[in-house]
């Protein structure tokens, strides 16, 4: 769905396509191809969630946790993160631990926070995190882990393309070029 225009997504969403509704929510939430509009994002996430999209609970949790377009409500965020955690969304698991560690909308509970931390550290995304609990639940650590994960995925994609198209193939800014024949293909 990420390759679709807003118009295409809106048409698909109007016909009940849950993936398109979710993608519209993400675009409104992050301002991708449209201005940030938290009210529309929330509506899309709620509708996509009702249609069975599991990722919607994470985004709704984030909106309530950060107060995006609404009053911050950590207790409500926790409800959505718990639903998403049941679907194995590791980011929701992280935020549940953070909520318990800092006592955001719940009674502070380091033991529970550490249970969530252990679950998170058991995944490839966070496998290299060595920080103590307080540092683990700081914003900078999750941002660093996200950046490292994104870089690893980008490198895997490059490696996959090079194994398919040859080691002299370069991928930069959506363009694939082969240094052997000096051709370019826009993707």
Image (cartoon, rainbow, N blue to C red):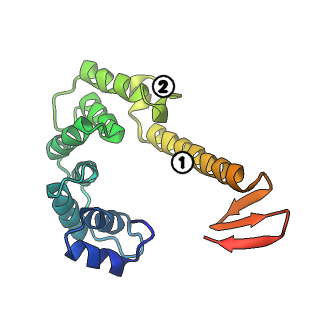
Could you say where residue 25 lies in the image, as x and y percent from the top left?
28, 65
**Residue farthest along the front direction in this orientation:** 164
Q: Is 51 placed above or below 99 here? A: below
Quadrant of the rendering where the C terminus is positioned: bottom right
Residue at image point 32% right, 21% down: 114
Q: Is 8 placed above or below 63 here? A: below
Q: Indicate the secondary structure of the residue bearing disc 2.
A: loop
Q: Earlier in the sequence, mark 1 or mark 2?
A: 2
Quadrant of the rendering where the N terminus is positioned: bottom left
Could you say where residue 131 lies in the image, as x and y percent from the top left?
48, 25
Residue at image point 66% right, 54% down: 161
Q: Determine which residue is flagged by label 1.
A: 150
Q: Determine which residue is flagged by label 2.
A: 131
Residue 86 placement, left or right of 167:
left
Asked if marks 1 and 2 touch (Cβ < 8 Å), the reply is no
Q: Find the distance from the CA under tag 1 to the CA under tag 2.
A: 20 Å
Residue at image point 47% right, 44% down: 143
């Amino acid at each position: 769905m990420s390759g679709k225009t807003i118009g295409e997504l809106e048409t698909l969403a109007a016909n009940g396509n849950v993936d398109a509704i979710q993608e519209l929510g993400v675009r409104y939430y992050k301002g991708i191809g449209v201005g940030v509009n938290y009210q529309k994002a929330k509506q899309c996430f709620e509708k996509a969630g009702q249609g069975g999209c599991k990722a919607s609970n994470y985004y709704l949790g984030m909106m309530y946790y950060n107060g995006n377009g609404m009053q911050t409500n950590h207790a409500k965020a926790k409800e959505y993160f718990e639903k998403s955690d049941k679907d194995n969304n590791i980011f929701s698991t992280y935020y549940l631990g953070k909520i318990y560690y800092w006592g955001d909308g719940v009674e502070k509970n380091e033991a529970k926070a550490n249970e969530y931390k252990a679950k998170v550290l058991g995944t490839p995304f966070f496998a290299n995190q060595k920080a103590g609990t307080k540092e683990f639940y700081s914003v900078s650590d999750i941002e660093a882990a996200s950046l490292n994960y994104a870089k690893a995925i980008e490198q895997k994609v490059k490696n996959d393309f090079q194994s398919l198209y040859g080691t002299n193939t370069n991928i930069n800014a959506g363009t694939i070029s082969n240094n052997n024949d000096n051709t370019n293909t826009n993707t």
